[in-house]
Image (cartoon, grey):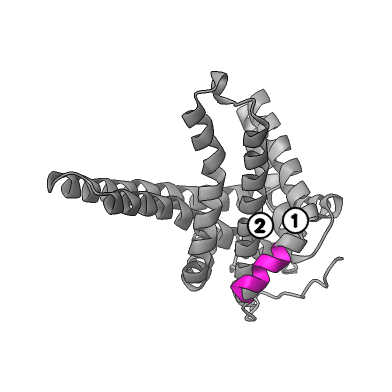
């Protein structure tokens, strides 16, 4: 069931002053700072879940990396479902923080699970269209990424069905494609810089620890946790950027 859409103004919290990269990054950072303590565990579980099927396929040594075992396909579906629920809960949690009415994590998980049929189908449609565009040609795929980037947020926060969520996302982007593309490019650049610096830091840390002697099981677990956080923190940041952009585009343009 669709939920009422709150009316937003330029003075609403976590609404960027404009789609200029500097303004979007500033608002995104503010929301990220408030949401990462509770959002990191959700993102981390989602990242781990998304990597389980690939790790299992590599371990099985199946030809072309795709096992024919029905159990693997069951694991694949379960991992995707868990990933979508965790990422959906992260988005709902960040949207509620932006509205100054923080949603408890378990409530966010419950709402995400209930919204899975609609939001999950929306995510599948969006990813299928984007991947098809990237396979056919890079530029159309990138353009589709911008046009469809807000459908997932609309499906979750407004309770829209896939068709309505896609229409809603496209309607918000219409007329503001290029400024939004520039803002997304800035977000991507910030994420890449963080991943490179954090990856170097963790690599040096593990190398120094390895010089002290054989790595223990606890040390291996710690290194995997650190690398997981390096991937999960950008997920939280990108989620914050999506919520900020979604809220910003709902503000009526100034006459």
- Describe the element under mark 1 as helix, strand or loop: helix
Residue 7 belongs to the span the image colors magenta = no
Q: Hey, which quadrant is residue 158 in on the image?
A: bottom right
- Mark 2: secondary structure: helix
Q: Do the residues labelled 1 and 2 touch (CB within 8 Å)?
A: yes
Instruction: Locate residue 112, reporting x and y percent.
Output: 70, 62
- Residues in magenta, as a range: 103-112
Q: Looking at the picture, tell me which residue is in the foreground, 94 or 176.
A: 94
Q: How many marks?
A: 2
x, y (%) of residue 236?
A: 52, 59
Which residue was labeled with disc 2? 85
Residue 115: give x, y in percent of width and height.
Answer: 77, 60
Kindly identify the residue that appears in the image at 63 percent across and 53 percent down.
82
Judged by its main secondary structure, the magenta piece is helix
Viewer-proximal residue, 175 or 205? 205
Whether residue 27 sits left or right of residue 8 in the image: it is: left
Q: Earlier in the sequence, mark 1 or mark 2?
A: 2
Above or below residue 192? Residue 239 is below
Spatial CA distance of label 1 from label 2 is 7 Å
Instruction: Please give the name of the residue rendered at 40% of the width and 52% of the height, measured from the top-left corner.
Output: 230
Q: Residues within 10 Å of mark 2 (few under 14, many from 20)?
A: many
- The answer, for residue 217, to whether it is visible in the render is yes
Name the residue at 14% across, 46% down.
Answer: 213
The image's mark for residue 69 is none
- Judging by the rendered image, the residue that carries numbered circle 1 is 116
Q: Residue furthest bottom?
A: 101
Q: x, y (%) of residue 203? A: 27, 45
Residue 104 counted in the magenta span: yes
> In this orientation, does residue 98 appear?
no
State the residue at coordinates (56%, 50%): 184
Q: Residue furthest top?
A: 63
Q: Judge left or right: residue 19 versus residue 237.
A: right
């Amino acid at each position: 069931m669709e939920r009422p859409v709150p009316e937003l103004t330029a003075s609403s919290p976590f609404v960027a002053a404009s789609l200029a990269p500097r303004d979007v990054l500033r608002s995104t950072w503010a929301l990220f700072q408030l949401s990462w303590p509770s959002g990191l565990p959700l993102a981390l579980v989602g990242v781990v879940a998304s990597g389980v099927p690939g790790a299992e396929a590599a371990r099985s040594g199946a030809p072309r990396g795709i096992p024919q075992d029905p159990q693997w396909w069951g694991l694949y579906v379960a991992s995707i479902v868990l990933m979508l629920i965790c990422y959906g809960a992260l988005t709902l949690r960040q949207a509620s923080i932006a509205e100054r009415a923080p949603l408890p994590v378990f409530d966010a998980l419950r709402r995400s699970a209930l919204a899975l049929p609609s939001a999950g189908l929306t995510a599948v449609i969006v990813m299928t269209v984007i991947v098809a565009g990237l396979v056919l040609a890079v530029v159309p795929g990138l353009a589709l990424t911008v046009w469809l980037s807000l459908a997932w947020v609309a499906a979750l926060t407004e309770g829209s069905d896939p068709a309505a969520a896609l229409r809603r996302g496209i309607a918000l982007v219409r007329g503001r494609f290029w400024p939004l593309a520039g803002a997304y490019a800035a977000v991507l650049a910030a994420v890449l810089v963080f991943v490179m610096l954090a990856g170097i830091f963790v690599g040096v840390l593990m190398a120094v620890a390895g010089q002290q002697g054989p790595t223990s099981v606890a040390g291996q677990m710690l290194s995997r946790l650190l690398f997981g956080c390096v991937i999960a923190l950008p997920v939280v940041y990108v989620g914050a950027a999506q919520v900020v952009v979604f809220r910003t585009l709902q503000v009526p343009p100034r006459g």
